[in-house]
Image: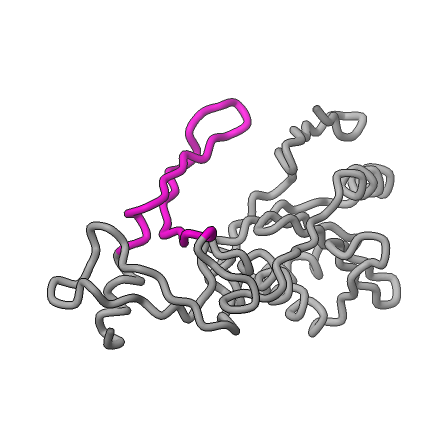
Amino acid sequence: MDSSSLLFLYKYCWQSLAHKIKRRVDGSIDRYKACLVAKRFTQQEGIDYLETFSPVVKPATVRLVLTIVVTRGWFIHQLDVHNAFLNVILQEEVYIEQPPGFSHPTLSSHVCHLHKSIYGLKQSPRAWYTRLSDYLISFYFRASNADTSIFIYSDGHDLIYLLMYVDDLLLTGNNLTLLRHLITLLNSEFKIRDLRSVHYFLKIEVTKTAMGFMLS
């Protein structure tokens, strides 16, 4: 299929296959989400994907970092990456059928050649982890040996922690100016939504109190 037809599919078919309602902690509707999702069960190991294991931050690490935030009086930002997987250029050749309702009127038997990772592909989480970690390492972050989904930046008295759980990030440190600068850099590379202070992460509700944080 020619490039203009592919652009048509990529631009307009996201809302056709998968629908999800994202809710706030109190159960109210935050927003409606829709995207094109690949049929992962049709992928063959060694042909259209390689590595699939993707590290995610451990709940114990989250609790430990929140403890550090409280004891040291740091501010913590919760960040959400929009369409995280679409930031990854695929290394393998992957083809998908045209989405129902969005097939080309004269080339309905043709398939789409994916250039970017999408939801549903087996390699997407791993590829996204590699993409973000490479970007952070380029700014002198390093992954912790104890939990490879926490990235640490240390320069003199400045200390920053970034926790990663797929497209949900927690960012904290002792230099608020540096934190804001890093958020600006991340937003220039990826589309980031800054949710400000953490409120719900890894199915843990975080409520700020005069004594610190209450987790439930």
Residue 194 pos. (x, y %): 55, 49
Residue 215 pos. (x, y %): 73, 27
Left or right: 18 with respect to 3? Answer: right
Q: Residue furthest bottom?
A: 2
Q: Is residue 152 above or below residue 135?
A: above
Residue 71, quarter of the rendered image:
top right
Along the line of sight, which residue is nearer the eye, 149 or 90? 90
Query: Which quadrant: the N terminus?
Result: bottom left
Q: Is residue 1 magenta?
A: no
Q: Residue furthest left?
A: 106
Q: Is residue 57 above or below residue 67?
A: below
Residue 214, quarter of the rendered image:
top right
Q: Magenta stretch? A: 13-41
Query: Which quadrant: the C terminus?
Result: top right
Residue in the image at 45% along x and 72% along y: 93
Residue 139 pos. (x, y %): 71, 71
Residue in the image at 61% along x and 58% along y: 52
Q: How is the image coloured?
A: one colour
Q: Is residue 21 magenta?
A: yes
Residue 68 pos. (x, y %): 84, 42
Residue in the image at 75% along x and 54% along y: 150
Q: How many marks?
A: 0
Residue in the image at 75% along x and 30% along y: 213
Left or right: 25 with respect to 175? Answer: left
Q: Is residue 116 above or below residue 16?
A: below
Along the line of sight, which residue is nearer the eye, 44 or 37? 44
